[in-house]
Image: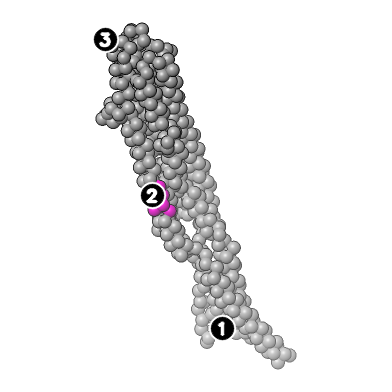
């Protein structure tokens, strides 16, 4: 009787163990699409078995729960997400900016330069015509407005980047707090560090953080994770977060750590890296070049006109354009209150002539800006912008492909394959059914023995 009861207990324990394994497989299946979830494995361990001993029952028991998560595969995905987040956001920002510098016919500064010098050429044919002089003033106002509009759009892009940097830093700090909360739960009990749901939440937060900034994540023995932003600066350590802050220093923005140290150069990936490059380097460069063009254009036009005489035979008392270099020549470029009669078409000593107007028309093709004409200089700005955009677009496509490969490899390591899990269900079901049949046979044998005893 002892052996029969021992066998029944052993088989009942086996059914309980198989039930636990069934629960694990079921959990895997329902979490197949859960972000951050890694497949769990319920290990089975054979109990000691000695058929000649009543005390050694044999059977099976549950072993330790095993996670299929691969830390190397995770870190590779995060690393590529840093690069893709950078490329995605910078592509978007530069694509928006590209519309500010159109090269299409009839649009933007390039077209207004052509129209301005076209009016100058017409004026040089009829230097004393009031209509031609009025057209020159009209085209002057239009090109000044075009410079103003372009400069304002660059300023708006700068303000938008400032706002996005503020929001991005706030998001990084929020995710850090979320990770701290999870760390606290995992440290409360080492058992919870093996909680597949909590583990999935942690890795979902880390994956989200990877799109915003580059970092290194280190798992600790107590179940918590340490996050080093930029690979060096603590952002999360156990149950403590170390917020980063955004600060404007001069015309640039810096990211400071919790001690006030500048860590801007460490943040080379994710959205924050792309925004820092866009706001601190690319935009100021384009703004400086636009101001150089505006100042060079206005200065050279004013210089040529100052060397001639107007309809009254007088040297002009004022230039055609005015600007202020402090806020920027492009945004402040404007036409003075000069009249058409005060435009100097003639050269000194040649009243009524068109020598000065011809010299002014010649500025269109002269290399007065570092050997380049005004149109060539503007084309250089757009070319550099286009080159950087094409470069980052290519990087975006490459990073997308590499990230997809890394995610596929991670899925092979730790993802849930429904077909595989279904096969496990069938195997466990057969084991459960077999154990049930053993219980049934043992029950019948026990009843038979009991009847014999009676």
Q: Which residue is mark 1?
A: 54
Q: Residue furthest bottom?
A: 452
- Magenta residues, as a range? 393-400
Q: Of circles 1 and 3, which is in front? A: 3
First-in-chain label (1 vs 2)? 1
Tell me where residue 439 sits by quadrant: bottom right
Q: Of circles 1 and 2, which is in front? A: 2
Judging depth in this view, the residue of 26 and 294 nearest the camera is 294
Q: Which residue is mark 3?
A: 349
Judging depth in this view, the residue of 372 and 129 nearest the camera is 129
Compared with 193, 3 (above or below) is below
Residue 397 falls within the magenta-colored stretch: yes
- Mark number displayed over residue 394: 2
Dot 2: element: helix
Residue located at (54% from left, 76% from top): 60
Residue 114 falls within the magenta-colored stretch: no
Dot 3: element: loop
Compared with 73, 335 (above or below) is above
User: Which percent across, then down, holds residue 253?
Assistant: 41, 32
Task: Bin the neighbour count of mark 1 within 10 Å (Cα to Cα): few under 14, some 14-19, many 20 and up.
Answer: some
């Amino acid at each position: 009787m002892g052996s029969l009861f021992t066998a029944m207990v052993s088989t009942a324990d086996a059914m309980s163990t198989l039930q636990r394994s069934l629960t694990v497989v079921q959990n895997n299946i329902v979490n197949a699409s859960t972000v951050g979830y890694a497949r769990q494995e319920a290990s089975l361990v054979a109990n000691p078995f000695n058929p000649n001993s009543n005390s050694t029952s044999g059977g099976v028991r549950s072993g330790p729960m095993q996670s299929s998560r691969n830390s190397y595969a995770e870190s590779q995905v995060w690393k590529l997400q840093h690069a893709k987040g950078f490329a995605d956001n910078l592509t978007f920002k530069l694509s928006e900016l590209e519309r500010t510098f159109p090269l299409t016919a009839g649009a933007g500064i390039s077209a207004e330069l052509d129209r301005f010098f076209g009016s100058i050429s017409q004026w040089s044919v009829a230097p004393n015509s009031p209509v031609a002089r009025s057209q020159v003033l009209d085209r002057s106002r239009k090109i000044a407005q075009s410079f103003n509009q372009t400069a304002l759009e660059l300023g708006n892009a700068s303000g938008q980047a400032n706002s996005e940097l503020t929001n991005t830093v706030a998001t990084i700090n929020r995710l850090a707090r979320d990770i701290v909360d999870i760390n606290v739960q995992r440290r409360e009990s080492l058992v919870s560090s093996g909680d597949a749901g909590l583990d999935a939440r942690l890795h979902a937060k880390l994956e989200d953080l990877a799109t915003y900034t580059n970092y290194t994540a280190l798992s600790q023995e107590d179940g918590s994770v340490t996050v080093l932003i930029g690979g060096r600066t603590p952002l999360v350590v156990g149950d403590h977060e170390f917020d980063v802050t955004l600060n404007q220093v001069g015309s640039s923005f810096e990211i400071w750590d919790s001690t006030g140290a500048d860590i801007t150069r460490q943040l080379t990936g994710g959205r924050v890296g792309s925004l820092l490059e866009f706001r601190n380097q690319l935009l100021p460069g384009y703004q400086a070049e636009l101001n150089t063009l505006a100042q060079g254009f206005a200065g050279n036009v004013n210089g040529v006109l100052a060397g001639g005489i107007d309809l009254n035979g007088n040297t002009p008392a004022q230039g055609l354009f005015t600007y202020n270099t402090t806020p920027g020549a492009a945004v402040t470029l404007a036409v003075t209150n000069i009249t058409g009669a005060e435009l100097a078409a003639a050269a000194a000593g040649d009243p009524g002539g068109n020598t000065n107007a011809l010299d002014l028309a010649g500025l269109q093709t002269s290399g007065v800006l570092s050997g380049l004409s005004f149109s060539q200089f503007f084309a250089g700005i757009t070319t550099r912008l286009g080159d950087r955009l094409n470069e980052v677009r290519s990087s975006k496509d490459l990073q997308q492909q590499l990230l997809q490969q890394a995610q596929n490899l991670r899925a092979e390591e730790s993802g849930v394959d429904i077909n595989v899990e279904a096969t496990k269900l069938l195997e466990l079901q057969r084991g459960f059914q077999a154990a049930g049949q053993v219980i049934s046979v043992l029950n019948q044998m026990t009843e038979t023995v009991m009847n014999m005893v009676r």
